[in-house]
């Protein structure tokens, strides 16, 4: 693997790791582990923990994939490994 | 126009549409048959993936699960969506770059081993066949109930329809048909939800309605979920918003299993072979999740509101007052309709001419109920699968909405069945025939073999649909458990661990599957035969209270661990494989699909 490809891969791993940490926090941490304390915070008539478990985590997943696609496409150009 | 005629018309129109599309988009080459010629736009592909993914279980069963499990059902909501993050970040772009047609093909090439490819084919076929049986059964039930024909005839009609468009169209036909099916099913799901949310809370958007206050009735002004919590606890049921499934550890592991399983199910993965570029594979997973999220974020509102409507239908007044319950002579028409199907039953145990619906297993409340003169719960059967189908009737929506929901349920079951059948047929014709036994087969013959394999798979699924084995309830556990414990880890390590070698991958897959299967069998019976389980299927016997359905994540961990240990003790993969891994890690140079 040449230098650029190696750096590209490192940048990729860093991005993926950050996004997966958020993935874990919004679903497992907020939706399951910390659900009771978070439920004392209400948005409208829904406890925050309950909301994360049934709606909020799904919205977060969407944002994560969007950010990933956007950042990776930028990295492709930056390291000149993009298609065509 | 009566409901029956309307249903015939709506279902008839949608089916004519599907078959018309399949004919227009029929496949001529193996590339079109397996991967739609890689010419599918990411948005279109995302929509097709969403239809492929959302089966009868998502459309019909999930809202019912939510209605009766409350917060506990979050495992399905998070589990069946969070897998797309794993798919987009860890698998899809690399598998597209690799540029072949099937999942076992990647495993075989990456681990330079026919054995690995065959093991992967076996895992894939087992997971897909068990899954497709459930779909076939759903199709049979839906047809029979709404076209007023017997179950067997309903199943044959369903097999015929799948045959026409899956066999003829291949991936290309299936993809375009699924786009139409997505539109039908999402419309059918959201229209009743909007009406119900508007009626209960005054807010037409179900995602907001769930956080709003009641618009009418005795509880006007209280939040909908608070009201629901109160209504269910007043009758001795567990509080809706805090009800857990098993334990929190079980919910954690269950969610993880469903996520990993989602990312490892081959009929979902092959979707990302159909897009033109690596870039498109990344965004395609996002688009798929957008279209899935429309249904999944609506489902919590559908479930909670259906539960509230159901409780209010029966408990019309104050709990304990002699006139607080509905009179049997005055039950609404929808209850009578569902009573005929045997999925909803009641029995006047205390002979007061009214129905009492409460949790008789709650000792404290049961004592209170006795003081009211109640002699046990009188709703003796409430099948949770009827919630979505009965919803428009409960909310007194017009007949065309009910007809639309029928068409939506069928679209969900048919689109998933077709996608699964394609995954099965491609693994047989491409991986087993061309890849292992007959490498010299011509493209024309391979295409023919693919179609024959699909006919065989439809026949097999139909046979099991006609003679449902005892394990129907366990199929989901097996399908997700297999995908999570075998396919996902090996794909991920194939991309992210350059040192991973043949021995590691094979032993990883075998041990991951074995642990999962053993756990499922020891609690559910060997091959699900009742009486052969050597440990009872009950909470106290479960490993840390983890239910068999949730065990796939543990299998996946075993797979990772075994693979890493074995690969460390054996020789590293040859140089050309390490170059292959380096090559799939960068998008540059991703051409069209290449054959061997």
Image (cartoon, helix red, strand yellow):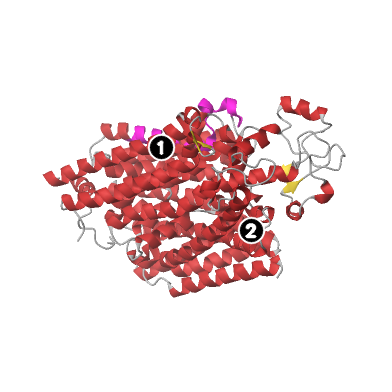
Q: What residue span does the magenta drawing correspond to?
A: B535-563
Residue drawn 19% across and 45% down?
Answer: A8
Q: Quadrant of the N terminus of chain A?
A: top left
Instruction: Tell me if B276 is positioned left or right of B371 in this view.
Output: left
Residue drawn 76% across and 51% down?
Answer: B339
Q: Looking at the image, is A24 positioned above or below residue B494?
A: above
From the image, state whether disc 2 or disc 1 is nearer to you.
1
Task: State which chain disc 1 sits on.
Answer: A
Front residue (pair B112, B477): B477
Coordinates of residue B383 in the picture (x, y in percent): 68, 46
Task: State which chain disc 2 sits on.
Answer: B
Q: Looking at the image, is A49 positioned above or below residue B46?
A: above
Query: Which residue is at the far right?
Result: B351
Residue B561, magenta (yes or no): yes
Query: Would residue B582 be visible to someone looking at this image?
Result: yes
Residue B379, magenta (yes or no): no
Coordinates of residue B410 in the picture (x, y in percent): 58, 60
Residue B37 falls in image quadrant: bottom left
- Disc 2 is placed on an element classified as helix
Residue bearing the label numbered 2: B142
Q: 10 Å neighbourhood of mark 2: few (<14), some, or many (≥20)?
A: many
Coordinates of residue B224 in the picture (x, y in percent): 60, 41
Are the residues under marks 2 and 1 on the same chain? no
Q: 10 Å neighbourhood of mark 1: few (<14), some, or many (≥20)?
A: many
Q: Looking at the image, is B290 positioned above or below residue B474?
A: below
- The chief SS type of the magenta part is helix
Coordinates of residue B407 in the picture (x, y in percent): 59, 63
Residue bearing the label numbered 1: A26
Q: Quadrant of the C terminus of chain A?
A: bottom left
């Amino acid at each position: 693997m040449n230098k650029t490809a190696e750096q590209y891969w490192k940048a990729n791993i860093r991005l993926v790791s950050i996004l997966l940490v958020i993935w874990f926090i919004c679903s497992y941490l907020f939706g399951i582990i910390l659900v009771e304390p978070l439920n004392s915070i209400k948005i409208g008539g829904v406890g925050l923990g309950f909301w994360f478990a049934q709606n909020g985590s799904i919205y977060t997943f969407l944002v994560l994939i969007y950010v990933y696609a956007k950042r990776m496409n930028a990295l492709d150009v930056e390291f000149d490994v993009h298609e065509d | 126009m009566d409901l029956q005629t309307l249903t015939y018309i709506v279902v008839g129109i949608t089916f004519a549409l599907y078959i018309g599309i399949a004919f227009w988009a029929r496949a001529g080459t193996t590339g079109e048959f397996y991967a739609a010629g890689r010419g599918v736009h990411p948005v279109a592909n995302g929509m097709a993936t969403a239809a492929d993914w959302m089966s009868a279980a998502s459309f019909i069963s999930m809202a019912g699960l939510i209605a009766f499990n409350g917060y506990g059902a979050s495992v399905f909501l998070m589990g069946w969506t969070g897998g797309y993050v794993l798919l987009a970040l860890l698998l899809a772009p690399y598998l597209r770059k690799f540029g072949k047609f099937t999942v076992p093909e990647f495993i075989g090439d990456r681990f330079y081993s026919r054995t690995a490819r065959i093991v992967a084919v076996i895992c894939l076929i087992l997971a897909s066949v068990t899954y497709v049986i459930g779909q076939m059964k759903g199709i049979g039930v839906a047809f029979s109930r709404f076209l007023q024909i017997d179950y067997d005839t309903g199943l044959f009609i369903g097999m015929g329809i799948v045959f026409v468009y899956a066999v003829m169209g291949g991936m290309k036909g299936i993809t375009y048909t699924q786009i139409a099916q997505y539109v039908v099913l999402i419309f059918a799901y959201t229209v009743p939800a909007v009406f119900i949310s508007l009626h209960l809370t005054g807010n037409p958007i179900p995602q907001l309605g769930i956080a709003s206050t009641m618009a009418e009735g005795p509880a006007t002004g209280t939040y909908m979920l608070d009201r629901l919590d109160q209504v269910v606890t007043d009758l001795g049921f567990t509080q809706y918003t805090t009800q857990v499934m098993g334990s929190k550890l079980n919910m954690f592991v269950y969610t993880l299993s469903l996520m990993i399983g989602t990312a490892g199910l081959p009929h979902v993965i092959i979707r990302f072979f159909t897009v033109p570029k690596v870039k498109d594979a990344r965004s395609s997973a996002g688009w798929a999740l957008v279209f899935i999220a429309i249904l999944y974020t609506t489902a919590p509102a559908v479930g909670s509101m259906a539960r509230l409507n159901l409780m209010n239908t029966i408990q019309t007044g104050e709990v304990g007052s002699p006139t607080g319950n509905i009179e049997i002579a005055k039950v609404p028409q929808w209850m009578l309709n569902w009573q005929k199907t045997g999925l909803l039953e009641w029995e006047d145990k205390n002979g007061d001419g009214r129905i009492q619906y409460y949790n008789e297993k709650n000792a404290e409340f049961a004592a209170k109920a006795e003081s009211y003169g109640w002699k046990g719960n009188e709703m003796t059967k409430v099948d949770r699968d009827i919630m979505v189908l009965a919803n428009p009737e409960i909310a007194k929506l017009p007949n065309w909405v009910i007809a639309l929901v029928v068409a939506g349920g069928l679209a969900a079951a048919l689109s998933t069945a077709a996608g699964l059948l394609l995954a099965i047929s491609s693994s047989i014709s491409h991986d087993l025939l061309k890849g292992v036994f007959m490498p010299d087969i011509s493209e024309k013959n391979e295409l023919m073999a693919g179609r024959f394999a699909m006919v065989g798979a439809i026949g097999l699924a139909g046979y099991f649909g006609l003679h449902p084995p005892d394990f129907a309830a366990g199929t989901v556990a097996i399908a997700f458990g297999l995908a999570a414990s075998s396919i996902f880890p090996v794909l991920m390590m194939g991309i992210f661990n350059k040192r991973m070698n043949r021995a590691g991958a094979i032993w990883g897959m075998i041990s991951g599957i074995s642990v999962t299967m053993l756990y499922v069998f020891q609690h559910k019976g060997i091959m699900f035969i009742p009486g052969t389980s050597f440990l009872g299927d009950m909470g106290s016997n479960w490993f840390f209270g983890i239910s068999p359905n949730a065990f796939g994540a543990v299998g996946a961990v075993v797979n990772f661990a075994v693979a890493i240990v074995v690969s460390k003790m054996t020789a590293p993969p040859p140089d050309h494989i390490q170059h292959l891994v380096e090559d799939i890690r960068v998008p540059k140079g991703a051409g069209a699909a290449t054959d061997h």
